[in-house]
Amino acid sequence: YPSLSKLLVLFTVSGGGLVAYAEANPTNGAYAISSSESESKKKKVVVLGTGWAGTSFLKNLKDPSYEVQVVSPRNYFAFTPLLPSVTCGTVEARSIVEPIRNIVRKKNVDVRFSEAECYKIDAENKKIYCRSAQDQNLNGIEEFIVDYDYLVIAIGARVNTFNTPGVEENCHFLKEVEDAQKIRRTVIDCFEKASLPTISDEERKRILHFAIVGGGPTGVEFAAELHDFVNEDLVKLYPGVKDLVKITLLEAGDHILNMFDKRITAFAEGKFKRDGINVKTGSMVVKVAGKEISTKEMKSGQISTMPYGMAVWSTGIGTRPVIMDFMKQIGQANRRVLATDEWLRVEGCDNVYALGDCATINQRKVMEDISAIFGKADKDNSGTLTFKEFQEVIDDICERYPQVELYLKKMQMSDITDLLKESTGDVAKESIELNIEEFKSALSRVDSQMKNLPATAQVAAQQGNYLANCFNRMEECEKYPEGPLRFRGTGRHRFRPFRYKHLGQFAPLGGEQTAAQLPGDWVSIGHSSQWLWYSVYASKQVSWRNRALVISDWGRRFIFGRDSSGI
Ligand code: FAD
């Protein structure tokens, strides 16, 4: 029924008082969605994704001269840092999600939303191809095309299994709200199964063995949550099987939480040992069968197997297929994520921006620019700088390139001194001359370590905010091409490059203890940090509704414990 379907599309995409039309595409049968001619000449911004980056962009976009179309298979924003708390019922799933329509409702910018996933980006013709996320049969109109003037890609990443056999089929992931809910049900199922009278003791032990793969922040936090859930709530309800419970955390590297300060890593490993959580470092999972996990010892190469009841895979993130396809189109085929410049513009195409976990600022260009900064400072072309000049260059680099600043901050002072010594011999004397080439080569040796900004909500949210501010000022800058004074930079751009401000990170370790690594490498571990964690996470909620729900969930847990019904 083409006319009926047209009407249906018209109905679904024309919310917010805008008149939109849908037209059957003669080539592939998809529907094209674009603004009607009678509509104002607003620039059309298409935003892909309603995660941290996309939502932060939408929240901060204030210029009403844009018409915004949001496309995402998820019609809500999820506060991912609290997902591990959802796995054990410390916080309810509904408390950490907020409908995207609610978030954009009160804005004076026209924002329309389509619950669909983008499966193809055609940057040449400025179109994106989408497919409805609805399951029911929409009579062939589930596919549509959207035109854009500006495209903001913020579709995040997918889980990475590193093609390890059996992971997709047998492991749980912890990426989406549904994953957390599934884990919660499965934990209870394991306890109920193990309590059945027909089960042998050995089988009981297997069922109650929880294996967590990946010793990063998510894996560690889940292990801590699960340990608390078992010891504070489930032991009272399942006294017969409580002694059989085992939690194992498997990590291929030498330590867990290896992106944190060494003091935090050591504390976390010590605490987990005291809590009875079995931490196996240097142990890489090579296969996951229905009831057994095979691991390879990194040092000896020895393969061993262990029975398990439930496995959670949390080893990092990979690229979404639509991004891989897009990267091939624009000549970035051999990259892991989309490369952008420091203004978050995707390299190799016009008016396309990428932010959050699906993008990274191109390091090669950064290293070239750093070389240029050194070249400029070396006025007499001697190949050397005085220590003072050198410090000014470093300040300049840190100002322009947060990645380098992050790296320099992460290094202990002694490491920096060593690095300088490699090129100078002695940094104590101000008069000493530094050899630029040697320093640059020392810097490029550590290049791999300072590769990308971390894939975190903090980075994604700051990028969304930055880009929205650029869009808010775009018209002003077009009117005055030289740009308002404070935004004028060099080269083609009109805005300051994106600058990441690291506000610190937390690692909740269970038992009301949290490790916090704050700016300036200030480390705090214990109960006081847990209260800091509560206040920061409550304040960071996207709405007052979420804030109230999350705080009341915490209160409920303190008073009544976690709910252990398997629904
Ligand atoms: P996401 O937030 O993943 O959003 C991607 C969006 O794109 C989603 O709305 C998705 O539905 C949509 N999408 C997907 N495919 C398509 C498509 N084809 N077309 C259109 N839309 C699409 N970071 C921290 O800083 N602190 C923490 O404590 C922390 N804890 C975490 C705990 C867990 C369990 C997890 C999983 C992550 C955690 N992170 C944390 C990382 C943080 O969540 C991510 O870095 C952040 O979500 C990245 O934001 P994003 O907008 O790039 O992607």
Image (cartoon, rainbow, N blue to C red):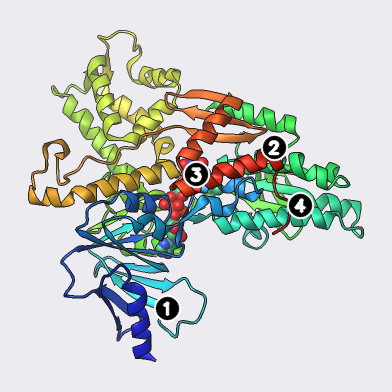
Density class for disc 3 (Cα within 10 Å; few <14, some 14-19, many ≥20) is some
Query: Within 8 Å of ligand 1, the CB of disc 1?
Result: no
Query: Is 33 on the left-hand or right-hand side of 115?
Result: left
User: What residue does disc 2 label?
Assistant: 279
Density class for disc 1 (Cα within 10 Å; few <14, some 14-19, many ≥20) is some
User: What residue does disc 3 label?
Assistant: 547
Query: Is 386 on the left-hand or right-hand side of 419?
Result: left
Ranked by sequence position, the earlier of labels 3 and 4 is 4
Q: Residue at x 19, y 58 (%)?
A: 65
Ranked by sequence position, the earlier of labels 3 and 2 is 2
**Mark 3: secondary structure:** helix
**Gap in angstroms between the C-alphas marked 1 and 3:** 36 Å
User: What residue does disc 4 label?
Assistant: 308
Quadrant in which residue 219 is drawn: top right
Quadrant in which residue 185 is drawn: bottom right
Q: Which mark is residue 328?
A: none
Q: Residue at x 59, y 35 (%)?
A: 508
Mark 4 or mark 1: which is in front? 1
Ranked by sequence position, the earlier of labels 4 and 2 is 2
Residue 29 x/y as whole percent: 35, 84
**Can residue 343 be seen at all in this image of the molecule?**
yes
Residue 233 x/y as whole percent: 75, 43
Q: Nearer the viewer, residue 543 or 313?
A: 543
Q: Which mark is residue 142?
A: 1
Ranked by sequence position, the earlier of labels 1 and 3 is 1
**Gap in angstroms between the C-alphas marked 3 and 2:** 34 Å
**Gap in angstroms between the C-alphas marked 4 and 2:** 15 Å
